[in-house]
Amino acid sequence: MSHAITLNLADGSIQFSFSVAAAQALKADLDALIGQMKEAAAAGTTRRAPLSPTEHRHSGEVFLEVFCNPNLWASPFAARVLLTLRDDRIRLTTETGLSQIYDDLTTYLDQGS
């Protein structure tokens, strides 16, 4: 069952139909990304292997893609993601904060419980 999720962006927000299962899958990918970034930050400035980018795609009533290259950011709190949302009539691509998307997903999942 799909409900409307609202993602807050720097200059507004976007609302679209999104299932709880899809939100849980995206949150799991973001949890893994944030965990990797926290581990890398805790390791300090020692030379480390580059982290793999996260690219999450969901196809449902709309197509959603969230991309983040963790090597560009010092911490998950500073990280930005490239968000693409499209259907057959419109396409929106924007950059927004990882922590904002994560908070919006958490709020959506808490309301669905």
Image: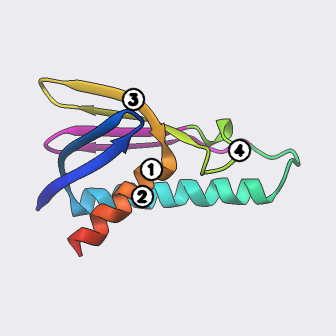
Q: Secondary structure at mark 3?
A: strand
| Mark 4, residue position | 74
| Mark 2, residue position | 103
Q: Using the image as rendered, state which of residue 31 and residue 101 is in the foreground.
A: 101
Image vertical order of residue 96 relative to residue 23, above or below: above
- Give the CA distance from mark 3 to mark 2: 17 Å
- Give the numbered dot on residue 100: 1
Question: Where does the image place residue 52, in percent across and percent down from the top left?
Answer: 60, 43
Sooner in the amino-acid sequence: mark 4 or mark 1 = 4
Q: Amino acid at mark 1?
A: Gln
Magenta residues: mostly which secondary structure?
strand
Give yes or no for contact between labels 2 and 1 (Cβ–Cβ under 8 Å).
yes
Q: Residue at x 37, y 33 (%)?
A: 11
| Mark 3, residue position | 94
Q: Secondary structure at mark 2?
A: helix
Going by the picture, which residue comes out furthest to the bottom? Answer: 113
Question: Where does the image place residue 10, in percent across and percent down from the top left?
Answer: 42, 36
The image quarter containing residue 69 is: top right
Q: Amino acid at mark 4?
A: Ala
Give yes or no for contact between labels 4 and 1 (Cβ–Cβ under 8 Å).
no
The magenta-colored residue range is 50-68
Magenta stretch: includes residue 54:
yes
Describe residue 29's horizontal placement relative to residue 45 as left or right: left
Are there few (<14), some (14-19), or many (20+) residues within 10 Å of tag 2?
Answer: some
Q: Using the image as rendered, state which of residue 81 and residue 88 is in the foreground.
A: 81
* Circle nearer the viewer, 2 or 4: 2
Question: Where does the image place residue 105, in percent across and percent down from the top left?
Answer: 35, 58
Q: Residue at x 13, y 57 (%)?
A: 2
Q: Secondary structure at mark 1?
A: helix
Are there few (<14), some (14-19), or many (20+) residues within 10 Å of tag 4?
Answer: few
Q: Residue at x 24, y 69 (%)?
A: 111
